[in-house]
């Protein structure tokens, strides 16, 4: 009987030992993080988190606040035990400095992170899909895009909606500068640490010889986090240029042409790979072309007679360098005698700045004319007449032929004027036009 009782006790002890064990319960700031096998395991886990945090945030002196840590040795259900990996994750969450996450790098730069597996891959695919069409044959990112699983500062971990918003925005916004009186391309470029050449590349379409007050120049472009390249296979019918054959004619001036038999474009069936970067076409590579119809040659007569240098070219050049201080149209200058509707543009610069003929022609006025002060008028023989007002001195006389770009006067402030400038006008058949539409 005694033997049987002893066996029962041993069996009961075995059952208890199989269900319970000694362990160490860990708390941080009052929050129960779980039970691990020993106090040593808890200490090692804390040390591991400290090493990870130091490496991640770059703080070699970081330590977990021991005043917030508490451990309790006791007997616990084996089911309540957690691994040191789980304790490390729970402790990291409570401390709140680092997290183990999926981290997006763009060209080696850490951008965002999420704890959701596969979420970044899905977002990147959606970003490319926004540019893809039924004709897309390839879509990819220009930048080196990499997703790593690692510890990261908690500030990088965010919800997917915010991540999507960031990836669709730019990491640097566009910077612009509004031109004021006294500015030059050189001074603006120097102010922002650019060369004039780089500044002009950012502002294609601007004339390097002229700068207007109020012009808005781009200093730096907006830079997207991700650049999507979308290559499409497109098929279309395209015109084929026709050749032109010339017959010289000594009775016509050089630069004059007359079509005697018009050409006809041919047609070709084209297959091309068209490359778009963030929706803007950057390249069109023809991979196949089949001619549908041949072009028909055009025949023209071409003048060979030498053209006088003072003949108009049909286009206008800037009359001087400087800054535009008054535009074409309604204005209120506050200057007594000045017009309220300005039929010119005013280009300001220093006294004596050269004034040039905007195109070739014949001088029809050179002298004093009321509010204009010293004025030059040039008839270009094609319905156009140009005016150059407020000069300090004149270099041409009535009846003189001048070629495009020839100096005709020096800048001044004569007549009704508040400072040195050129009042420049373009007139067509008696009607004044906005010069900026022709320069």
Image (cartoon, rainbow, N blue to C red):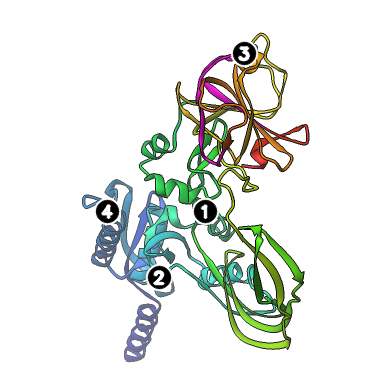
Q: Nearer the viewer, residue 414 or 102?
A: 414
- Location of mark 3 (residue): 416
Q: Quadrant of residue 161?
A: bottom right
Tags 4 and 2 touching, CB below 8 Å? no
- Location of mark 1 (residue): 170
- Location of mark 2 (residue): 148
| Of the two numbered discs 3 and 4 in the rendering, the one whose residue sits closer to the viewer | 3
- Secondary structure, mark 4, is loop
Mark 2 or mark 4, which is nearer the start of the sequence? 4
- Location of mark 4 (residue): 58
Mark 3 or mark 1, which is nearer the start of the sequence? 1
**In the displayed structure, does residue 134 sit left or right of residue 401?**
right
Residue at (70, 88) in percent of width and height: 291
Q: Distance between the Cα atoms at labels 4 and 2?
A: 19 Å
Instruction: Quadrant for the N terminus, please.
Output: bottom left
Q: Nearer the viewer, residue 287 or 325?
A: 325
Q: Nearer the viewer, residue 378 or 111?
A: 378
Q: Distance between the Cα atoms at labels 3 and 2?
A: 72 Å
Furthest-top residue in this view? 336
Mark 1 or mark 4, which is nearer the start of the sequence? 4
The boundaries of the magenta stretch are 402-425
């Amino acid at each position: 009987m005694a033997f049987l009782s002893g066996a029962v006790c041993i069996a009961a002890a075995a059952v208890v030992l199989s269900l319970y064990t000694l362990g160490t319960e860990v708390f941080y700031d009052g929050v129960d993080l779980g039970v691990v096998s020993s106090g040593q395991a808890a200490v090692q886990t804390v040390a591991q988190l400290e090493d990870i945090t130091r490496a991640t945030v770059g703080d070699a002196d970081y330590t977990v606040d021991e005043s917030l840590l508490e451990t309790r040795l006791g007997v616990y259900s084996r089911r309540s035990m957690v691994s040191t990996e789980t304790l490390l994750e729970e402790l990291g969450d409570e401390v709140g400095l680092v997290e183990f996450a999926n981290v997006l790098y763009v060209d080696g730069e850490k951008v965002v992170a999420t704890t959701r597996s596969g979420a970044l891959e899905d977002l990147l695919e959606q970003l490319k899909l926004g540019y893809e069409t039924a004709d897309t044959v390839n879509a990819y990112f220009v930048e080196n895009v990499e997703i790593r699983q690692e510890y990261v500062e908690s500030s990088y971990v965010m919800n997917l909606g915010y991540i999507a918003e960031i990836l669709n925005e730019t990491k640097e916004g566009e910077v612009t500068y509004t031109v004021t009186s006294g500015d030059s391309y050189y001074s603006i470029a120097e102010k922002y640490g650019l060369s004039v050449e780089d500044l002009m590349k950012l502002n294609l379409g601007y004339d390097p010889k002229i700068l207007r007050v109020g012009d808005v120049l781009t200093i730096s472009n907006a830079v997207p986090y991700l650049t999507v390249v979308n290559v499409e296979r497109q098929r279309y019918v395209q015109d084929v240029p026709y050749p032109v054959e010339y017959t010289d004619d000594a009775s016509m001036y050089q630069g004059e042409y007359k079509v005697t038999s018009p050409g006809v474009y041919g047609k070709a069936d084209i297959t091309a790979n068209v490359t778009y970067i963030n929706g803007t076409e950057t390249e069109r590579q023809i991979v196949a072309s089949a001619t549908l119809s041949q072009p028909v040659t055009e025949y023209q007569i071409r003048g060979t007679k030498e053209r006088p240098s003072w003949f108009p070219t049909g286009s206008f050049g800037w009359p001087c360098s400087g800054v535009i201080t008054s535009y074409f149209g309604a204005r209120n200058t506050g200057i007594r005698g000045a017009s309220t509707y300005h039929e010119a543009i005013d280009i300001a610069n220093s006294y004596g700045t050269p004034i040039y003929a905007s195109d070739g022609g014949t001088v029809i006025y050179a002298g004093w004319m009321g509010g204009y002060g010293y004025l030059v008028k040039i008839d270009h023989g094609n319905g156009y007449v140009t005016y150059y007002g407020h000069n300090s001195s004149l270099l041409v006389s009535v009846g003189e032929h001048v070629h495009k770009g020839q100096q005709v006067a020096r800048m001044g402030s004569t007549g009704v004027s508040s400072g040195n400038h050129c009042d420049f006008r373009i007139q067509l058949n008696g009607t004044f036009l906005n010069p900026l539409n022709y320069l």
